[in-house]
Image (cartoon, rainbow, N blue to C red):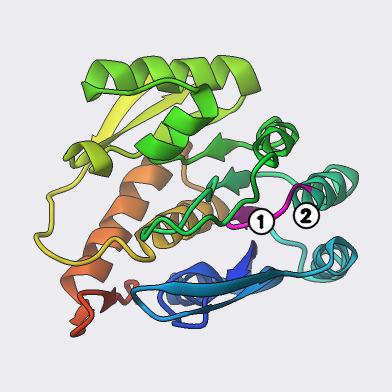
């Protein structure tokens, strides 16, 4: 059995973060390993508190994950602080980790800050280790310091990020009302979409998509195919969601 290591925060609501990562990875027939970066207190609608863990502990978790059943792919989500970012980058570099998928989580869906101010630059060393990074439009805007509008803007932004960090870039189009995402990688540019599902909150969808991409890469798919199949996994999760009074949902990955 192949393993995927998820490095992210613990969402106490179970809708995102490591809980969603584990559900997605195991639902796709792979063994999930985890390294927690923070503990949060949150409902499905509101983040009440975030407590980052010690960078040394995060580093120890990552090293332990590589002692046996070495992860084929590493998925990175919420990191919280610049020191944790640096510890993660150092650990993965020293371990010669391959196939790193970075979802640059800067804030929650509701706007709560999930990466401390001033830590954004620390992410750059991590991006340079990545096989692919998966920002949404607001995250890409923040990383580039410019506004993104429409398909052309997404393509230009993805190319700029790829040139800056020398990794493949998938910019997700949901915030612009698009069902397609823009992938720029070493073989060119592709727009990848699947039929939309109406309704449902965005809580946890980024975690599910990036974990599904990581899982598909672990299963041996090419990057474009991995993104397409991962979007189908996300679509299935939205189709089978359990709607809750708060307006959020609990989605299920495909079995």
Q: Position of residue 47 (x, y in %)?
A: 46, 71
Magenta range is: 72-82
- The residue singled out by tag 1 in the image is 79
For label 1, the crowd category at 10 Å Cα-Cα, with few meaning under 14, some 14 to 19 and many 20 or more, is many
* Quarter of the image that includes the C terminus: bottom left
Residue 32 position (above or below residue 243): above
Circle 2 residues within 10 Å: few <14, some 14–19, many ≥20: many
At a point 32% along the width and 45% down the height, the residue shown is 228
Q: Is residue 74 magenta?
A: yes
Q: Quadrant of residue 235?
A: bottom left
Q: Are marks 2 and 1 in contact (CB under 8 Å)?
A: yes
Q: Which residue is mark 2?
A: 84
Q: Nearer the viewer, residue 164 or 30?
A: 164
Q: Is residue 5 left or right of residue 109?
A: right
Is residue 242 covered in magenta?
no
Camera-side residue of 127 and 195 = 127
Could you give the CA–CA distance between mark 2 and mark 1, rounded to whole angstroms?
Answer: 6 Å
Sequence order check, earlier mark of 2 and 1: 1
For this view, does 196 lie left or right of residue 132? Answer: left
Q: Answer left or right for 166 relative to 227.
A: right
**Image height of 167 relative to 131, above or below:** above
Residue 165 quadrant: top right
Could you tell me which quadrant the N terminus lies in? bottom right
Which is nearer the eye, 16 or 210? 16
Depicted 236 relative to depicted 87: above or below: below
């Amino acid at each position: 059995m192949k393993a995927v290591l998820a490095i992210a925060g613990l969402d106490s609501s179970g809708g995102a973060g490591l809980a969603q990562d584990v559900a997605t990875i195991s639902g796709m027939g792979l063994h999930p390993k985890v390294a927690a970066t923070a503990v949060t207190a949150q409902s499905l609608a509101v983040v009440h508190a975030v407590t980052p863990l010690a960078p040394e502990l995060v580093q120890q978790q990552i090293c332990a994950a590589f002692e046996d059943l070495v992860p084929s792919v590493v998925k990175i989500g919420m990191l919280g602080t610049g020191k944790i970012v640096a510890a993660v980058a150092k650990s993965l570099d020293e371990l010669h980790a391959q196939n790193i998928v970075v979802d640059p989580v800067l804030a929650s869906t509701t706007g709560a800050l999930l990466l401390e101010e001033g830590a954004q630059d620390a992410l750059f060393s991590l991006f340079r280790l990545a096989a692919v990074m998966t920002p949404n439009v607001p995250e890409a805007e923040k990383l580039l310091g410019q506004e993104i509008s429409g398909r052309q803007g997404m393509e230009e932004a993805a190319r700029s990020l790829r040139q800056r960090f020398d990794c493949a870039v998938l910019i997700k189009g949901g915030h612009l009302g698009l069902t397609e995402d823009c992938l720029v990688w070493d073989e060119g540019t592709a727009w990848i979409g699947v039929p939309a599902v109406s309704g449902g909150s965005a809580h946890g969808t980024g975690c599910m998509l990036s974990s599904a991409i990581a899982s598909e890469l672990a299963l041996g798919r090419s990057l474009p195919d991995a993104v397409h199949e991962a979007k189908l996994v996300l679509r299935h999760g939205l189709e089978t969601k359990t709607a809750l009074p708060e307006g959020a949902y609990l989605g299920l990955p495909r079995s």
